[in-house]
Amino acid sequence: MHAYGITRYGSAHLEHAFTFLTYDLLQRRLEDLGACVRMVRNVADVDEPIYVKTKQLGAHCLDLARTESAEFAPVMQALNSQRS
């Protein structure tokens, strides 16, 4: 399964969590039914909005993406989401 990645130019929000928790629930159910499931989440959206945001912040786009991604992981862990 593939869950399209979070946008990395702003803090994660409830919509991100809902999307990943929905996939998490589906993965758990399929595994309960005996399926072997590989779940993949990507981090994407290196496009115009991230360039605008980094220009406002005076930061590099990869630094912003790393920071936002690092903040997202513990949030999903706190929601008991399985790691992909």
Image: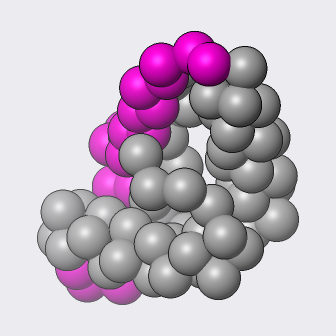
Q: Is residue 47 above or below residue 67?
A: above
User: How many tags in the picture?
Assistant: 0
Q: Residue at x 81, y 52 (%)?
A: 18
- Counting from the top left corner in percent of width and height, residue 49 is at 48, 50
Q: Is residue 19 magenta?
A: no
Q: Residue at x 47, y 63 (%)?
A: 9
Image check: 62 left or right of 7?
Answer: left
- Counting from the top left corner in percent of width and height, residue 52 is at 42, 59
**Residue 12 visible in rendering:** no
Near-viewer residue (39 or 60): 39
Image check: 6 left or right of 19?
Answer: left
What colouring style does the render use?
one colour
- Counting from the top left corner in percent of width and height, residue 62 is at 18, 63
* Location of residue 69 (image quadrant): bottom left
Near-viewer residue (24 or 66): 24
Near-viewer residue (65 or 37): 37
Q: Residue at x 53, y 49 (%)?
A: 6
Q: Residue at x 62, y 28 (%)?
A: 31
**Residue 37 visible in rendering:** yes
Image check: 70 left or right of 7?
Answer: left
Q: Is residue 44 above or below residue 79?
A: above
- Counting from the top left corner in percent of width and height, residue 63 is at 20, 74
Q: Which residues are magenta?
A: 34-59
